Image: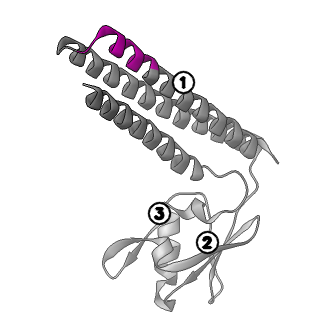
Amino acid sequence: MNEELDFLLDATKEAMHSALSHLEKKLLNIRAGKASPAMLGSVMVEYYGSSTPLSQVGNISTPDARTITIQPFEKSLFQEIEKGIMLANLGFNPMNNGESIIISVPPLTEERRRELVKQAKMETEDSKVSIRNERKSANTEIKKLEKDGLSEDAAKSTEQEIQKLTDTYIKKIDEILATKEKEIMTV
């Protein structure tokens, strides 16, 4: 029985950590006014008939806080990269100077900053729900084990352990949100 409980705790912790990692990736896509290669993470480029991530067909760099440059590995990709950026609907207008593609990241308006904070809050709420669902399914599993002969004390202590995990991950999510909110609202 103890092995099953250990496995259950590990699986729950792993799932909660996965929810946290997913949130961090999602929040990377919410721009905070500062240029970052991660802003183009969702851009796909048509490359020899298949859809390929932008990072695999060119070098992405940020020479300053307001500019992203893309150096394609092949000259023939300029149009496809520009098309991919436009299709990703990120609100960027790529410019081609023959050597590289330059994107000027416009400063965020106060209204846009508030919208981005709302978007970040929605993402964090989704992660919290995901973590709570993990807690619920772990507790359901404990109830099943209890019916199969798990002692009441072991069940209670495991439920408390899972609640501690839940509280820890919810706290981490709140901290991540606070950091992201500050990042977005800083002019």
Residue 83 relative to residue 112: left or right: left
Q: State the CA–CA distance, disc 3 to disc 2.
A: 12 Å
CB contact under 8 Å: marks 1 and 2: no
Residue kind at label 2, given as amino acid type? Pro
Quadrant of the rendering where the N terminus is positioned: top left
**Residue drawn at (22%, 17%), measured in percent from left and top?**
144
Residue kind at label 3, given as amino acid type? Leu
Residue 47 relative to residue 41: left or right: left
Percent position (x, y) of residue 64?
77, 70
Percent position (x, y) of residue 130?
42, 31
Name the foreground residue: 30 vs 83.
Answer: 30
Identify the magenta region. 150-160
Magenta residues: mostly which secondary structure? helix
Q: State the CA–CA distance, disc 1 to disc 2.
A: 44 Å
Q: Is residue 57 above or below residue 99?
A: above
Residue kind at label 1, given as amino acid type? Asp
How busy is the neighbourhood of tag 2: few (under 14 within 10 Å), some, or many (20 plus)? many
Percent position (x, y) of residue 100?
62, 84
The residue tagged 3 is: 87
The residue tagged 2 is: 94
Farthest left residue in view: 148
The residue tagged 1 is: 167
What kind of element bears circle 1? Answer: helix
Residue 14 relative to residue 58: left or right: left
State which tag comes first along the sequence, 3 or 1: 3
